[in-house]
Amino acid sequence: MTSFSVKQLFFILMIVTFCGSTIALQSMDPYQGKIVAQSGKKESALKMLAFKQVFVKVSGNKEVNHLPGSQLSLNEINSFIEQFSYQKGAVHTYFIASFDAQKINKALHDLQQPIWGETRPTTLIWLVKSDQLGRDIVSDSYLQRRADKVLSESIVQQQFARGIPLQFPLMDLDDSLAVSVTDISGRFYRVLTSASKRYHVANFVSAELLQINAQQWELSWQLLTNTTQNQVLLSGMQRGEKSQVIEQMLDAISDYYAHQYAILEQTGGKFSQIIHINGIDSLTRMTQLHQLLSKMESVASYQILNVDQNVVNINVNIKGGLQSFANAFEIQPHLRAVSSESEPFSFNWQ
């Protein structure tokens, strides 16, 4: 590949900054509210619900709308909305509203709430559902065709409510040969890790949903790192209605991610950290690096110090704390940390 000089890289950054990037990253826009437009519900009520949904998604705090000062009038909410529309889906019509990110962030800052931006890792869910009809692994197509309407609705609604991207296995021939019901219910994590590699996710869930009676279900689950160590990050067991236990699991996972990646900016709290990225040897990779840094909530600003062959050395001004910054870097799919005591923030681009 062609190597770029320091001057060329600075020129590239200027072009990218002013023209924008066309490279899409997998993300779920936390500043967009998506509400089921129920028959008879006024548009003003839908705007209010969309605003409250966005407040929860961006802050990562499910109780944020109950805080003193969080209740805004319709006129105030209208000033936050950039655009809105209705979208007809296979089952529901949705009211979709996009909100001004700077105004949402300022409102949350005034409430002394953190900001959880677009650092939202996609989580793969290996879920076994056990009922009187048998035991099945819940696949993407199972949810898409709404084989279990309650389960599908609960998962979709919770993704909208908390802004966490979820993925379910395809259960095609590759998955079917690699993973069985017993592997999931028996917690054979190495098998699941091997099968999860194709999905390029940082974490996965191993879960079993068991029917107790007509109304009661039991859900046991574990959130794990998709590595050979299989660190259990979170686990739980809930009993209740099907939609309730699914909501509780996804709430717990959302709360965990918010704690890891949300930024509570303090006045005068910014400091800098030099990072080293090896493997930036093309315009495409330089554009991707720019986009990655510009979308990270923990990055206040950054400056390229120099380029040594294919290693880009960058001074990053951080807001919110070093640990949140480090957590955000650990889950970036293009970066792999390099162990180095002398240069702790060193990564290979892949």
Image (spheres, rainbow, N blue to C red):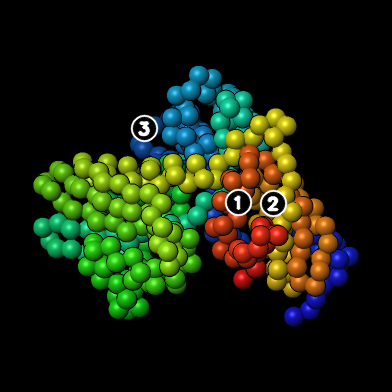
Residue beneath disc 2: 294
Q: Position of residue 29 (x, y in %)?
A: 54, 48
Q: Is residue 210 above or below residue 79?
A: below
Question: Residue 99, labelled with which disc?
Answer: none
- The residue carrying pointer 3 sits among few (fewer than 14), some (14 to 19) or many (20 or more) residues within 10 Å by Cα, namely few
Q: Nearer the viewer, mark 2 or mark 1?
A: 1
Q: Is residue 85 visible?
A: no
Please name the residue shown 63% across and 39% down the image. 320
For marks 2 and 1, the one nearer the N-term is 2
- 3 vs 1, front mark: 1
* Picture coordinates of residue 130, whole percent (x, y): 18, 58
Q: Amino acid at mark 3?
A: Gly
Q: How many marks?
A: 3
Q: State how far apart marks 2 and 1 are (Cα).
A: 16 Å
The answer to which quarter of the image holds residue 77 is top right
What residue is drawn where x is 75% and y is 68%?
Answer: 311
- Viewer can see residue 316: yes
**Residue found at the far right of this picture:** 7
The quarter of the image holding the N terminus is: bottom right
Q: Distance of mark 3 from mark 1, alpha carbons?
A: 47 Å
Question: Which disc number belongs to residue 40?
Answer: 3
Residue 31 at x, y percent in the picture: 56, 42
Label 3 sits on a secondary structure element that is loop
N-term-proximal mark, 3 vs 1: 3
User: Which image quarter: residue 231?
Assistant: bottom left
Q: Is residue 173 above or below residue 81?
A: below
Taking 281 as reference, is 220 left or right? left
Which residue occupies 15% across, 43% down? 215
